[in-house]
């Protein structure tokens, strides 16, 4: 009887160990990394986000033990002093995540309009950030909406920033 209990405990231990190893190796979080362009106009004035205060600064390392990711920041952030292309590295990113992470707010008493790839959308802040989208957000009075939409961030610009940020080395 003791022999059967010992075999059972050994099999159970090997099974639990196998589940732990499998989970760490194969069921790890899906790696996401894509980009989208954006511009914000407040009362007709284009906002500038290339200042260091808006950037996510993180160490250049692949060692997870050295750097622990912040899931909220990973959803949407800016870096490399590129203030018009958002970097997304976690699932479920919405435009409000970017503005939360860069500490930028909109005046709730002013109208907020959002356009994705030139098409008006409702609730832009709750709209998902999608790869290579070009978003323009207007807050308050903006007399030159059509002109601003024509000057939105291009796919070429988004791709250029994406290539530059694929590794820790810069162009």
Image (cartoon, grey):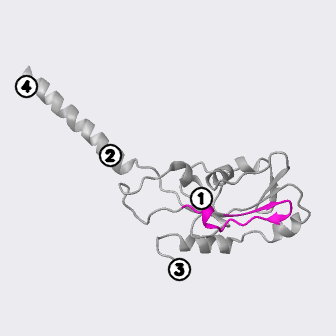
The spot of residue 89 in percent (x, y) is 54, 57
Asked if the residue at tag 3 contacts the one at tag 2, i.e. Cβ–Cβ closer than 8 Å, the answer is: no
Task: Check disc 4 and report its element: helix, strand or loop.
Answer: helix
Q: Which residue is mark 2?
A: 22
Which badge, 3 or 4, is on the more N-terminal residue?
Answer: 4
Q: Disc 2 versus disc 1: distance between alpha carbons?
A: 31 Å
The residue under label 4 is: 3
Q: CA distance from mark 3 to mark 4?
A: 65 Å
Tell me if 85 is positioned left or right of 151 in this view. Answer: left
Judging by the rendered image, the residue that carries numbered circle 3 is 171
Q: CA distance from mark 4 to mark 2?
A: 28 Å
**Viewer-side residue, 137 vs 14:** 137
Q: Residue at x 21, y 34 (%)?
A: 13
| Residue mark closest to the camera, 2 vs 3 | 3
Q: Earlier in the sequence, mark 2 or mark 1?
A: 2
Labels 1 & 4 near each other (Cβ < 8 A): no
In the rendered structure, which disc, 1 or 4, sits on the residue that comes first in sequence?
4
Q: Is there CB contact under 8 Å for labels 4 and 2?
A: no
Distance in Å between CA atoms under marks 3 and 1:
20 Å
Q: Which residue is mark 1?
A: 77
Question: Dot 4, how many residues are within 10 Å of its Cα: few (below 14), some (14-19), or many (20+)?
Answer: few
Q: Which residues are magenta?
A: 37-56
**Residue furthest to the front:** 53
Q: Label 3 crowding class (10 Å Cα cut-off): few <14, some 14-19, many 20+?
A: few
Which residue is depicted at the point 82% across and 70% down? 150
- Label 2 vs 3, first from the N-terminus: 2
> Where 113 falls versus 52 (above or below)?
above
* Mark 1 surroundings within 10 Å by alpha-carbon count, few (fewer than 14), some (14 through 19), many (20 or more): many
Q: Secondary structure at mark 1?
A: loop
């Amino acid at each position: 009887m003791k022999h059967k209990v010992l075999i059972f405990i050994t099999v159970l231990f090997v099974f639990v160990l196998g589940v732990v190893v499998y989970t760490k190796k194969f069921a790890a979080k899906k790696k996401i990394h894509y980009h989208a362009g954006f511009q914000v106009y407040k009362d007709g004035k284009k906002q500038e986000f290339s200042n260091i205060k808006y950037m996510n600064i993180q160490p250049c390392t692949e060692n997870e033990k050295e750097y622990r990711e912040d899931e909220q920041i990973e959803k949407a952030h800016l870096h490399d002093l590129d203030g018009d292309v958002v970097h997304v590295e976690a699932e479920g990113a919405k435009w409000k995540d970017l503005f939360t992470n860069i500490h930028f707010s909109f005046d709730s008493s002013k109208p907020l309009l959002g356009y994705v790839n030139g098409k008006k959308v409702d609730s832009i802040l709750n709209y998902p950030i999608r790869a290579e989208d070009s978003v323009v957000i207007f807050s308050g009075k903006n007399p030159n909406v059509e002109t601003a939409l024509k000057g939105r961030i291009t796919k070429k610009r988004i791709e250029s920033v994406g290539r530059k940020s694929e590794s820790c080395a810069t162009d």
